[in-house]
Image (tube, grey):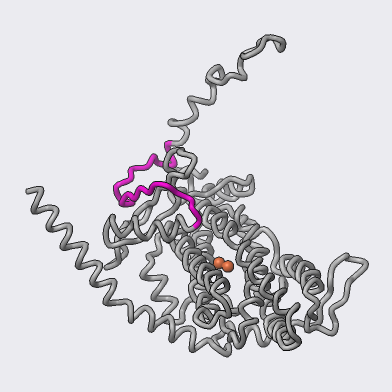
Amino acid sequence: MTNDAKGKGGWPLFEVFIRSKQGLSHVHAGSLHAADAKMAIENARDVYTRRNEGTSIWVVPSDAISASAPEDKGTLFDPADSKIYRHPTFYTVPDDVECL
Amino acid sequence: MVHEASAPDERAEQFDAWVADENKVEPQDWMPEGYAKTLVRQISQHAHSEIIGMQPEGNWITRAPSLRRKAILLAKVQDEAGHGLYLYSAAETLNVSRDQMEADLMSGKAKYSSIFNYPTLTWADVGAIGWLVDGAAIVNQIPLCRCSYGPYARAMIRVCKEESFHQRQGFELMMALSQGTPEQKAMAQDALNRWWWPAVQMFGPPDHDSPHSAQSMAWKIKRFSNDDLRQKFIDMAVKQAQALHIEIPDPDLKFNEETGHWDTGEINWDEFWAVVKGHGPCSRERMANRRKAHNDGAWVREAATAFAAKERARAEKVAA
Ligand SMILES: [Fe+2]
Ligand SMILES: [Fe+2]
């Protein structure tokens, strides 16, 4: 995702996302070069789903992705560290009460 | 993670501490130049090996003895193409273009594993490659799944998942031959005779002759030394050869009670270096084939580019 998507004269880079059989979200599988989106999907099938890994493919031009900057990691994610009451394990409940 | 704003020598220190602590490095993170350079060299070499590695086995696809074996071999060789592509993508995250890597391979500037410069003379060689060459690759690649560089580690996880079939189909093929007619068994033995030492050499030069290893280990790119990985492979292969009832071509091979490992005879490093320098039995042929395939495919790439441009122009016209 970092390099300029078009290596000189080469085809643009696409990021590939695959939805697995279990019906979960599309997950990033990797990237590949292709002349256009249609070819990117065809190639993604061969490169990333040779063993029934997927039921659906998304391809996105790599340069269309905006990413958070590594130096913002603290500002973005540290505030969640102190909010432990967002997790079920924060609460003490009696062992013998069921379905909690 | 290293802070962009830190002073230069502080950054290097922070980086070393970060990887020493088993954290991952991602493409946008700051990293020492040497770290990126080492990775580009190693990952692109690895990618080239997967791509060139299709040739020795590809040589037998049209002559596989049954439809079953043909389908297996075709799938295996296709996997290797996939491995090359995963790895090229990983290297590209370090700002080296695919075009540049391909150009370096075809000009001979970039190296690939010396094992692929040996010929596949008989059908048994397909079995020996799967069993020994993919077997050695697995030993090498499993620790790379924990490499400090995220994109490389993720590519290796994908590769390792697929390699196990490669090794097993090779072993199964060797087993079929070694349990077959005397001629078939002789073929399996002959293949082992020719592939054993090149496979042992796949782990690279001995530790005392491997100058970059220490830095790679400190950066957690490498996890084990060449000699440690080689020993692991030898111990594994000796038992497997016994199960196949064929003999490893090394009169000095002996179990060492003290270490609990198998000791081998002298490894011919002169041969290894000669092959690395491009004097392997098939070096020229492999390169010539690669260049020819690239040049023969030029019109396809050009046509696809032109077609994509035409489609884009048409879509824009409709939208306007
Ligand atoms: Fe491979
Ligand atoms: Fe393989």
Q: Left or right of B161: which side holds B317? A: left
- Residue B89 visible? The answer is yes
Task: Indicate whether residue A56 is drawn in magenta.
Answer: yes
Q: Position of residue A10 (x, y in %)?
A: 30, 66
Ligand 2 appears in which quadrant? bottom right
Pick the residue in front: B94 or A34: A34
Residue ID at (76%, 71%) = B237
Pick the residue in front: A92 or B166: B166
Q: Position of residue B194 (x, y in %)?
A: 69, 85
Q: Is residue A90 above or below residue B123?
A: above
Q: Is residue B111 above or below residue A19?
A: below
Residue ID at (51%, 67%) = B75
Q: Is residue B19 above or below residue B273?
A: above
Q: Left or right of B303: which side holds B61? A: right
Q: Left or right of A84: which side holds B177? A: right
Q: Which residues are magenta?
A: A51-72
Residue ID at (50%, 71%) = B74
State the image quarter where residue A37 is shown.
bottom left
Q: Position of residue B273 (x, y in %)?
A: 63, 84
State the image quarter where residue B173 is shown.
bottom right
**On-image quarter of the C terminus of chain A:** top right
Pick the residue in front: B301 or B276: B301
State the image quarter where residue B95 is shown.
bottom left
Residue ID at (53%, 75%) = B53
- Residue B268 visible? The answer is no
Q: Position of residue A94 (x, y in %)?
A: 69, 9
Task: Indicate whether residue B19 is drawn in magenta.
Answer: no
